[in-house]
Image: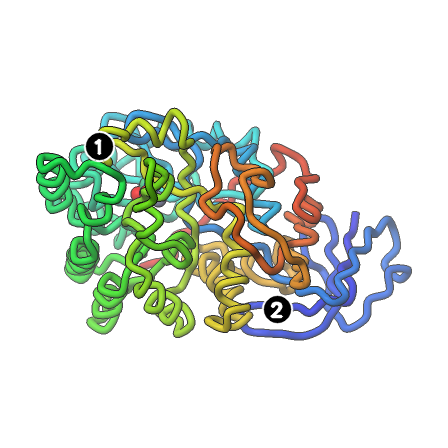
């Protein structure tokens, strides 16, 4: 079975040219100025891409789908999250496996993979969160890396008493990661400082969602980045700082790079387009916008976009963590510390970055592709299979209609949350066709694909 994409403007992380692309079965097999469908033989589906961009499928390097967290569970499963991802143009998800400290890591890997395998319509892989580090965990982590192809870990320097690691365990884990060539992704905030600030705010009656940001200010995040970077400097481990929300945190990570630490930086779309005034909305509406690190003062967006444009921030993810307003976010009506953290964004990310990044003149098209696809593939060991349009790569392709004008809404979202954090926002551009390994999975805002077709992408360690 073949698919011929005709007449598009192909944009990758490095190139921008007009060409036809032929995909045979699951792979891109030919790229040329004019491919004649009649010359190909056999059944060929032709997709007209004239006046459209052709991008490599987008990769979201940071999502939560199955997530037991703060006394509840995130409300998507792989079916709803895959559909949402695909209609937005995302063809590969990297989900965080987030077990509790008493869970066995290997069992957690199987639990998460068993939830994904039957329902995924996107390709997927995982970052393995390490929330307990002892001899049993160490052996299982080695098996997870080498037998199951999960070549990245995740650590939390936040969520005191629930997910955070002691310094002794962090040091030992980073030492293991360096030895095995595994990159360590990290949520960087000083957990003890947050705990103390939360207690003090609650004790003085400051309990609404608007107090979430003041309980974990930018200095707390920068301190977390500096701390992780010091540990990476001592152990030689390669680190990836997730959801960097503000200028001091980005600066701390760049400082580490200037000292020779192998550090990569991720931004996530909520921090790029939303600000802390959202969490200050009356009638508890602000709870929809509680995530960690929190939404910041608008001026930090300038630093984040600038660092993306300059290549200091490598990737734009979402930190998709979907919790309903009714029944989940409202668990925190009497104290912001009980509001489940997260803002669903897996469907909206490409259109928001295109609208507020490319169309607003903050980033160019090549940076759009590198930040939303190619760099994640490179950093996490999936390149060139994913993240590029070249002969031999998986035929994960987005045909992008930049003439489309629409609005974001919970009504057109495939995520199961009962709200959209970007309700009514105008957007420019959306995918008109999305292929995963050569099969059409989404068309003009509708899922048209096959549930269960997604594959676990096994990765090899590359960060020695
Ligand atoms: O608010 C967030 N970020 N929720 C999901 C958990 C995490 O910290 O990534
Ligand atoms: Zn986090
Ligand atoms: Zn997260």
Question: Quick one: label 1, few (<14), some, or many (20+) residues within 10 Å?
Answer: some
75 versus 235 height, above or below: above
- Mark 1 in CB contact with mark 2 (< 8 angstroms): no
Picture mark count: 2
Q: Residue at x 19, y 53 (%)?
A: 217
For residue 335, the mark is 1
Q: CA distance from mark 1 to mark 2?
A: 47 Å
Nearer-N-terminus badge (1/2): 2
Which quadrant holds the C terminus?
bottom left
Q: Which residue is mark 2?
A: 11
Q: Ligand 3: give its quadrant.
A: top left
Q: Residue furthest front?
A: 282
Q: Quadrant of residue 233?
A: bottom left
- Of 347 and 184, the residue lying toward us: 347
Judging depth in this view, the residue of 153 and 332 nearest the camera is: 332
Q: Secondary structure at mark 2?
A: strand
Residue 146 can be seen, yes or no: no
The image position of residue 253, as x and y in percent, is 25, 64
């Amino acid at each position: 079975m073949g698919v011929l994409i005709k007449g598009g403007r192909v944009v990758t992380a490095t190139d921008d040219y007009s060409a036809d692309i032929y995909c045979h079965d699951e792979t891109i097999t030919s790229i040329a100025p004019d491919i004649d469908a009649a010359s190909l033989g056999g059944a060929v589906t032709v997709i007209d891409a004239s006046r459209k961009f052709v991008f490599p499928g987008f990769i979201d390097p940071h999502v939560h789908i199955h997530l037991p967290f703060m006394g509840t569970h995130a409300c998507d499963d792989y079916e709803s999250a895959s559909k949402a991802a695909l209609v937005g143009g995302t063809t590969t998800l990297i989900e965080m496996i987030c077990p509790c400290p008493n869970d066995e890591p290997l069992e957690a890997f199987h639990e998460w993979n068993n939830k994904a395998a039957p329902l995924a319509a996107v390709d997927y892989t995982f970052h393995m969160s390490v929330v307990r580090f002892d001899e049993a965990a160490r052996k299982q982590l080695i098996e997870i890396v080498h037998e199951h192809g999960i070549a990245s870990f995740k650590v939390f320097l936040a969520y005191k008493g629930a997910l955070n690691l002691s310094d002794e365990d962090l040091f030992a884990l980073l030492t293991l990661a360096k030895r095995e060539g595994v990159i360590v992704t990290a949520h960087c905030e000083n957990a003890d400082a947050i705990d103390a600030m939360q207690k003090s705010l609650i004790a003085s009656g400051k309990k609404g969602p608007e107090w979430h940001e003041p309980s974990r200010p930018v200095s707390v995040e920068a301190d977390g980045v500096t701390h992780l970077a010091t540990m990476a400097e001592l152990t030689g481990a390669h680190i990836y700082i997730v959801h960097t929300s503000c200028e001091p945190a980005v600066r701390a990570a760049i400082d580490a790079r200037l000292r020779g630490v192998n550090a990569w930086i991720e931004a996530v779309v909520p921090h790029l387009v939303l600000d802390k005034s959202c969490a200050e909305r009356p009638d508890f509406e602000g709870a929809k916008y509680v995530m960690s690190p929190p939404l910041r003062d608008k001026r930090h967006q300038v630093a984040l976009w600038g660092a993306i444009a300059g290549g200091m921030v490598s990737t734009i993810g979402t930190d998709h963590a979907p919790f309903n307003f009714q029944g989940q976010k409202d668990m925190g009506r009497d104290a912001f510390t009980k509001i489940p953290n997260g803002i669903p964004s897996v469907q909206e990310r490409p259109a928001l970055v295109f609208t507020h990044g490319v169309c607003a003149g903050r980033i160019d098209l090549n940076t759009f592709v590198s930040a939303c696809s190619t760099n994640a593939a490179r950093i996490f060991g999936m390149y060139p299979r994913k993240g590029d349009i070249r002969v031999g790569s998986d035929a994960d392709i987005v045909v992008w209609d930049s003439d489309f004008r629409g609005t974001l809404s919970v009504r057109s979202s495939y995520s199961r949350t009962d709200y959209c954090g970007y309700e009514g926002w105008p957007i420019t551009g959306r995918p008109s066709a999305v292929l995963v390994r050569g099969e059409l999975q989404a068309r003009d805002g509708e899922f048209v694909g096959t549930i269960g077709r997604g594959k676990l992408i096994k990765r090899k360690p590359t960060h020695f």
